[in-house]
């Protein structure tokens, strides 16, 4: 019985994380962990320092 409860809790946490990522990507955020991710837009750099494409 305890194993079922543990599996249910872990499955709920994984589902919630995947749903959060899906919802954030649907809103157009490039890097989800960055507080400025919605303002990155079509630029190659995010204000947090993430590079989306290799520069040539």
Image (tube, rainbow, N blue to C red):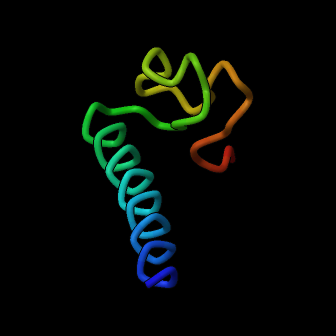
Q: Residue at x 50, y 21 (%)?
A: 40
Most foreground residue, 43 or 38: 38
Instruction: Judge whether 23 appears above or below 47 on screen.
Output: below
Instruction: Judge whether 41 appears above or below 21 on screen.
Output: above
Residue projecting furthest to the right: 49
Provide residue 37's location: percent of width, then percent of height. Answer: 51, 24
Q: Is residue 27 left or right of residue 11?
A: left
Most foreground residue, 22 or 55: 22
Instruction: Judge whether 14 appears above or below 21 on screen.
Output: below
The mark tally for this picture is 0
Q: Is residue 55 left or right of residue 9?
A: right
Provide residue 50's location: percent of width, then percent of height. Answer: 68, 36
The N terminus lies in quadrant? bottom left
Most foreground residue, 12 or 30: 12
Provide residue 16's location: percent of width, then percent of height. Answer: 38, 51
Instruction: Kindly indicate the quadrant of the structure image that contains residue 29.
Output: top left
Instruction: Judge whether 8 appears above or below 52 on screen.
Output: below
Q: Is residue 2 left or right of residue 33?
A: left
Instruction: Kindly indicate the quadrant of the structure image that contains residue 31.
Output: top right
Residue projecting furthest to the front: 1
Most foreground residue, 8 or 24: 8
Q: Residue at x 60, y 34 (%)?
A: 33
Provide residue 38's location: percent of width, then percent of height. Answer: 43, 20
Q: Residue at x 29, y 41 (%)?
A: 23
């Amino acid at each position: 019985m305890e194993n079922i409860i543990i599996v249910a809790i872990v499955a709920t946490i994984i589902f919630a994380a995947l749903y959060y990522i899906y919802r954030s990507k649907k809103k157009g955020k490039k890097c989800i962990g960055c507080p400025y991710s919605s303002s990155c837009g079509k630029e190659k750099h995010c204000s947090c320092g993430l590079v989306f494409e290799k520069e040539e």
